[in-house]
Image: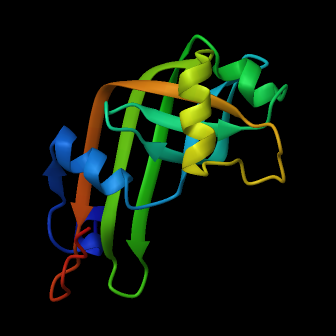
Amino acid sequence: MDRDDELGDEPEELGAEACLRLLSTVPVGRVVYTEHALPAVLPVSFEVVPDGRLLLAVRRDSATARGLDGTVVAFQADRLDPLTRSGWNVLVHGRADILRDPEQILRALRSGLRPWTDETDPMFVAVVPELISGRRLSASGHPVPHA
């Protein structure tokens, strides 16, 4: 039995707009970046802002914040149901930059976006999507969850 047989139906490829819409339905994703010349993956709080960028909340002065600023990163989020073996996943590649504009920072603070740690002074990182891909997965005989 190959991997596709285990998953059931063929995955449905999703367009960029559908991917961003799905991303806006979950509060946490994983950012992939380079730390000390090695790949690093970290769960982060995020939101999709109206212009299509992803806004990540990280701890100020953390290795993560330093590793993200001015680099190309990958970001992945999903919603999977192990019982129905269905769900979706989205992968975004793009450039990450620390927000420095006071108005954008204030807007991010007002949105309530915060790192998972108890951080009173978070740093926000904007990721401009350059490549967006996603798939909706469904096992035979089970309904596909839609956002």
The residue that appears at 61% across and 32% down in the rendered structure is: 106
The residue that appears at 48% across and 38% down in the rendered structure is: 75
The residue that appears at 37% across and 52% down in the rendered structure is: 23
Q: Is residue 124 visible?
A: yes
Q: Is residue 140 left or right of residue 20?
A: left
Q: Is residue 21 left or right of residue 42?
A: left
| Count of numbered marks | 0
Please provide percent x and percent y for residue 17: 18, 42
Query: Closer to the camera, 77 or 40?
Result: 77
Q: Is residue 57 left or right of residue 111?
A: right
Q: Is residue 99 visible?
A: no
Which quadrant of the view contains residue 54?
A: top left
Which quadrant of the view contains residue 12?
A: bottom left
The residue that appears at 47% across and 46% down in the rendered structure is: 47
Please provide percent x and percent y for residue 52: 32, 33
Q: Is residue 88 left or right of residue 139?
A: right
Q: Looking at the figure, which quarter contains the N terminus? A: bottom left
Which quadrant of the view contains residue 100?
A: top right
Question: How is colour applied across the structure in the image?
Answer: rainbow
Please provide percent x and percent y for residue 58: 71, 37
Q: Looking at the figure, which quarter contains the C terminus? A: bottom left
Query: Closer to the camera, 65 or 144?
Result: 65
Please provide percent x and percent y for residue 22: 30, 56
Q: Residue furthest top?
A: 70
